[in-house]
Image (cartoon, rainbow, N blue to C red):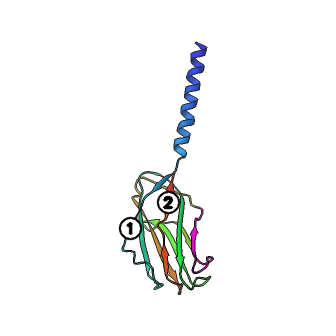
Amino acid sequence: MMQQLIKRLTALEHDVERLGTIDNHLTFLPVGIYTHAPFPFAASGSAYAPWTVTIPRAGRIVSFILGFYVGTTNNATNYWTFTLREAISATTVVTMNTSASSANTWTRLAPTTSYDVTTSLVALEIVARSTLAPGNLWMSAPIIAMR
């Protein structure tokens, strides 16, 4: 009887470990074109929203990585801001900007991200907006992951 109980407890322990591991896996969200993306974007003060992401389930957004290139001017006063936000409510998930990045160089930004999403959230969008007069902007498709 005791040996059966030990075997059963061992099996349950393995099940708990397996479930914990499954729960810890990242889900990389597919990113699609939301609006026509006429790269490069020119600094006009307009907001560009080239990418959208469908949220498949409740969870937590844990990673947002974006590659970009700003031609010519990019500095502390002339820069681009990227905002990952809820598509319907425009609630900000995370924001970052190019002010500390070099011009004429492909750069990757990966800010610390932790944002809970519920089943009522359907989509996120990535918005780019210029401040003053930075150079033209090219963006690679972002990587967004959730747990």
User: Is 74 placed above or below 122 here?
Assistant: below
Residue 110 within the magenta-colored segment of the rendering: yes
Residue shown at 55%/28% (left/top)?
Answer: 12
What's the amino acid at mark 1? Ile
Sort mark 2 into few (<14), some (14-19) or many (20+) by Cα contacts within 10 Å: many
- Tell me: residue 47, above or below residue 110: below
Task: State the predominant SS element of the stretch in magenta.
Answer: loop
Q: Position of residue 123 (x, y in %)?
A: 40, 61
Residue 109: percent from left, percent from top: 58, 68
Name the kind of residue labelled 2 in the image: Ile
Q: Identify the residue position indicated by label 1 in the image.
A: 33
Q: Position of residue 117 (x, y in %)?
A: 47, 55
Q: With 96 as the anchor, is 33 left or right in this view?
A: left
**Vertical side of 29 occupied by 47: above or below:** below
Quadrant containing the N terminus in the rendered view: top right
User: Neighbour class for label 1 at 10 Å: few (<14), some, many (≥20)?
Assistant: few
Q: Quadrant of residue 77?
A: bottom right
Magenta region? 98-112
User: Residue 70 appears in which quarter of the rendering?
Assistant: bottom right
Q: Can you name the residue that lies furthest to the top here?
A: 1
The numbered disc on residue 144 is 2
* Residue occupying the point 63% across, 76% down: 100
Image location of residue 8, percent across then percent down: 55, 22
Q: SS for tag 2?
A: strand
Q: CA distance from mark 2 to mark 1?
A: 14 Å
